[in-house]
């Protein structure tokens, strides 16, 4: 049985509670969708927003007439920043958060690679605090994991 494309549309409309410009689909939290079940994986096991994300998904599904669809949370394999979609990475940068990278960190304000980490701890546990040496703006970097 094929998955209703409307189900994906509903899920794509659910924003991440900590970064409202990116959906739970673009963030890679939604792992799979079946006609009767949505499988999600939090960005990390202790993510304080996990319950809010599940509630928001449930509310969106119910409002769209998908009350029969269950939500299953799985922790293995662990979520990875590799699951963030290209669109999600672009949305992060446009919002002022540098997307995760294994290379040079680009300032989301001016694009410079003349950046430095100020603190491994940012505004949320999944981000670290950086500063651009060219434009002097501070910004969050979504940590790779």
Image (spheres, rainbow, N blue to C red):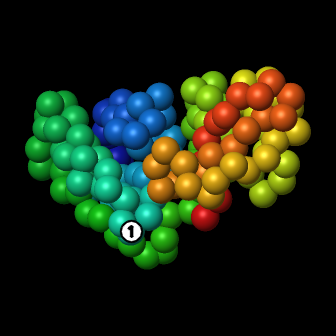
The answer to which quarter of the image holds residue 17 is: top left
In the rendered view of the protein, which quadrant contains the N terminus? bottom left
Residue at disc 1, secondary structure: loop
Q: Is residue 99 above or below residue 78?
A: above
Relative side of 32 to 80, left or right: left
Relative side of 100 to 123, left or right: right
The answer to which quarter of the image holds residue 62 is: top left
Relative side of 94 to 56, left or right: right
Q: Name which residue lies at 57% across and 27% down.
A: 95
Q: Name which residue lies at 84% across and 34% down.
A: 133
Q: Residue 42 at what x, y percent from top left?
A: 39, 59
Relative side of 138 to 30, left or right: right
Q: Residue 43 at what x, y percent from top left?
A: 45, 58
* Residue 92 seen by the camera: yes
Q: Nearer the viewer, residue 140 or 100?
A: 140
Q: Nearer the viewer, residue 11 or 35?
A: 11
* Residue 5 seen by the camera: no
Q: Residue 134 at what x, y percent from top left?
A: 86, 28
In the rendered view of the protein, which quadrant contains the C terminus? bottom right
Q: Name which residue lies at 34% across and 47% down.
A: 3
């Amino acid at each position: 049985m094929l998955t209703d494309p409307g189900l994906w549309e509903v899920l794509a409309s659910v924003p991440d509670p900590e970064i409202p410009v990116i959906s739970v689909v673009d963030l890679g939290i939604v792992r799979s969708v079946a006609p009767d079940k949505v499988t999600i994986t939090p960005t990390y096991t202790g993510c304080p927003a996990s319950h809010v994300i599940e509630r928001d998904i449930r509310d969106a599904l119910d409002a769209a007439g998908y009350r029969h669809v269950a939500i299953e949370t799985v922790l293995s394999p662990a979520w990875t920043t590799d699951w963030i979609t290209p669109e999600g990475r672009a949305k992060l940068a446009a919002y002022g958060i540098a997307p995760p990278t294994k290379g040079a960190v680009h300032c989301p304000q001016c694009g410079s690679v003349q950046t430095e980490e100020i603190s491994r701890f940012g505004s949320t546990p999944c981000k670290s605090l950086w500063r651009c040496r060219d434009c002097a703006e501070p910004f969050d970097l979504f940590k790779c994991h």
